[in-house]
Image: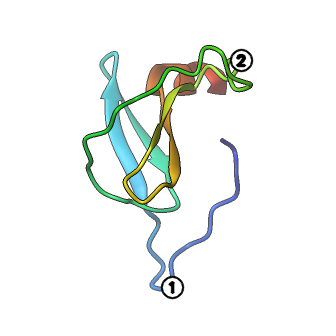
Amino acid sequence: FREPYQEKEDGRILSLLFSFDQSHYCVVVDELIGKQEIVVKSMSQTILQDCSFFSGGTIFGDGSIGFVVDMQGFLEALK
């Protein structure tokens, strides 16, 4: 999302590594939360419908809201 990142106190940078269309990518992230099974709600009728890199959203067990990033849309938005 083109936001500046901050190194951790020990100098580490958290990143997500993934492959798509036979290419490898690395995205710097603020935090790694973990793996969860979620129910994804489509955002086709919301204000974020024009953001191609969000494919939906969810409400976690603690009531917080999360967005699901469509990695293909994310990569296309960087072009």
Judging by the rendered image, the residue that carries numbered circle 1 is 9
Q: Secondary structure at mark 2?
A: loop
Q: Position of residue 35 (x, y in %)?
A: 26, 50
Q: Position of residue 22 (x, y in %)?
A: 30, 19
Furthest toward the bottom, the residue is 9
Tag 2 near tag 1, CB within 8 Å: no
Report whether 77 appears left or right of 66. right
Please name the amino acid that badge 1 sits on: Glu
For the N terminus, the image quarter is top right
Structural crowding at the residue carrying mark 1, measured as other residues with C-alpha within 10 Å and reported as few (<14), some (14–19) or many (≥20): few
Q: Is residue 49 above or below residue 59?
A: above
Q: Which residue is painted at 46% across and 62% down in the image?
A: 31
Structural crowding at the residue carrying mark 2, measured as other residues with C-alpha within 10 Å and reported as few (<14), some (14–19) or many (≥20): few
The quarter holding residue 33 reads bottom left
Report whether 28 appears left or right of 6. left
Q: Which residue is painted at 32% across and 38% down in the image?
A: 38
For the C terminus, the image quarter is top right
Q: Secondary structure at mark 1?
A: loop
Chain-order first, disc 2 or disc 1: 1
Q: Nearer the viewer, residue 75 or 66?
A: 66
Q: Which mark is residue 59?
A: none
The quarter holding residue 74 reads top right
The span from disc 2 to disc 1 (Cα, nearest Å) is 36 Å
Q: Nearer the viewer, residue 3 or 58?
A: 58
User: Given this view, does label 2 or label 1 mark the residue nearer the observer?
Assistant: 2
Q: Which residue is painted at 43% across and 43% down in the image?
A: 26
Q: Is residue 25 above or below residue 49?
A: below
Q: Which residue is painted at 60% across and 14% down in the image?
A: 44
Q: Position of residue 50 (x, y in %)?
A: 71, 17
Please name the amino acid that badge 2 sits on: Asp
Report whether 7 appears left or right of 58. right
Q: Which mark is residue 50?
A: 2
